[in-house]
Amino acid sequence: MAPQPYRFAQAWKPERGSSVFRLTVRNAMAHLDSEVKEECLREDLKFYFMNPCEKYRARHQIPWKLGLQILKIVMVTTQLVRFGLSNQMVVAFKEENTVAFKHLFLKGYSGTDEDDYSCSVYTQEDAYESVFFAINQYRHLKNISLGTLGYGENEDNTIGLKVCKQHYKKGTMFPSNETLNIDSDIEIDCVHLDLSKSPQDWKNLSFFRLEFYRLLQVEISFHLKGIDLQTIHSRELPDCYVFQNTITFNNKAHSGKIKIYFDSDAKIEECKDLNISGSIQKNTQYVLVFDAFVIVICLASLILCTRSIVLALRLRKRFLNFFLEKYKRHVCNADQWEFINGWYVLVIISDLMTIIGSILKMEIKAKNLTNYDLCSILLGTSTLFVWVGVIRYLGYFQAYNVLILTMQASLPKVLRFCACAGMIYLGYTFCGWIVLGPYHDKFEDLNTVAECLFSLVNGDDMFATFAHIQQKSVLVWLFSRLYLYSFISLFIYMILSLFIALITDSYDTIKKYQQNGFPETDLQEFLKECSSKEKYQKESSAFLSCVCCLRRRGSDDHLILVN
């Protein structure tokens, strides 16, 4: 028989329609679907971490938020400058009126305050003359004042002066015999002086027979009204003010020196009847329209940034689920925080403050509200955040990103270091207040001590701090030298140097990373991975791209982050 040719065994193929064939196809489709999801996720992640220019080159997406932030910077800064100029006039009007009141109602006022009080008297005659001088000046105010002032109603809806005195209930005192018999209960007597009586009638009142050995203080309070006309030059409606003035003769120390305090609290009220001709009303309408446009811009920025944060959280959830499903472990916290863009949070806070501040500004402009201080804080802080947010766009360039990266790297170490140094600082603060407080103006209270020590750390006012210590006690004087020399040496030469060294070390680390590359995290390694094997990419790249695009046009479109 002729030899039969050798036949190689053919590979076994499952018959179409069989269960094995269906299982094979199902596994292949599942593997393909997993690869498609991974590639789509990687592409969305890469797109999310692009800067606006890269996103425009990748998908021709217009950077709306970038343009909106630039426009917002210009408008918010313009708004702040206009409001700042207006607020300066308000503060200047209040301060100038306070100085004018001191010259009008305080006898012998020199123009500068003595420490925290305005002036002082040392004899009974000077005390009586100072009290009645203020009363007489109030009575003749309209004839002597240069300002646009008028009498205002007190708390009891009456026009006039309210004089109150505080004194111990009863007692006798004989310093020569070192004898004291006094009731520590405090009595308060008040009298209302209207303009119908003459000054002589007021002097004859028994109320003004003061027993200085048990007198604690005399308080004269009255209200005045005024109109600020300088706003007219800025084409704004004038403000009407109510000045709540209080003159206090403080004798609580019974040291032979009565300190005289003057306090003026100015409140802005809506003018009841304004009749001003000219273009002021038209200018006010223009300003209100500009403020409304600022609110619209900030509201649009707020919506876009909030949307980006929401979509970023959804993208993070996709990545966490995928990483847990494929690698069977959780993503580190550092990678999870990469999805939370702190600049967006800063912009949202800035937008909220700008919106609230602009609303308050519009109400102030319309003379419905008068809270200039709160409005200035909101607008000033929001403008600060807006300009700080510009660093975000500079951070896309490596040369400008060093500051941000250095701050991020050094912040934890700096905070821990400040916590330790703060304990030493507080110890010196309390010690200086207790020991040096009675002998040095800069150590009278805790707040002043903290400010003085902070100035010493920065090298300010060193000689004055040493020189102003009173040499009434040799022991305290020697202690002050030891206290100041040790504090300056410790904080300037050691603590401040270590503080700078921490930041310098972080800066050197960042520079090395920029030269040699930053440590890669799980997120960065995932973005650099190949989507599949090389053979699969060659055969199925077109198919994967098509499937990714189809998927993105469908249900996953809301997961693409728009910058």
Image (cartoon, helix red, strand yellow):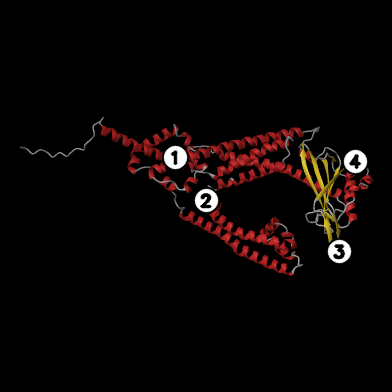
Q: Are marks 4 and 1 in contact (CB under 8 Å)?
A: no
Give the residue at x 60% y 59%. Answer: 421
Q: State the residue at coordinates (80%, 40%).
A: 242
Residue position for label 3: 177
Residue type at mark 1? Arg
Q: Earlier in the sequence, mark 4 or mark 3?
A: 3
Residue 243 position within the rendered picture, expressed as x and y whole percent measured from the top left = 80, 43
In the rendered view, tell whether residue 60 sits above or below residue 471.
Answer: above
Question: What residue sits right under mark 1 in the picture?
Answer: 318
Q: Secondary structure at mark 3?
A: helix
C-alpha separation, residue under disc 4 versus residue under disc 1: 79 Å
Q: Is residue 505 above or below residue 351?
A: below
- Quarter of the picture containing the N terminus is top left
Residue placed under numbered mark 2 in the picture: 398
User: What kind of residue is marked 3?
Assistant: Asn
Question: Does label 2 or label 1 sit earlier along the sequence?
Answer: 1
Instruction: Give the Cα separation between the discs numbered 2 and 4.
Output: 75 Å
Q: Nearer the viewer, mark 3 or mark 1?
A: 3
The residue that mark 4 highlights is: 195
**Residue 464 to residue 313: above or below:** below
Give the class, few, some or many, for how many residues have Cα within 10 Å of label 1's Cα (few <14, many ≥20): few
298 sits left or right of 260 in the view: left
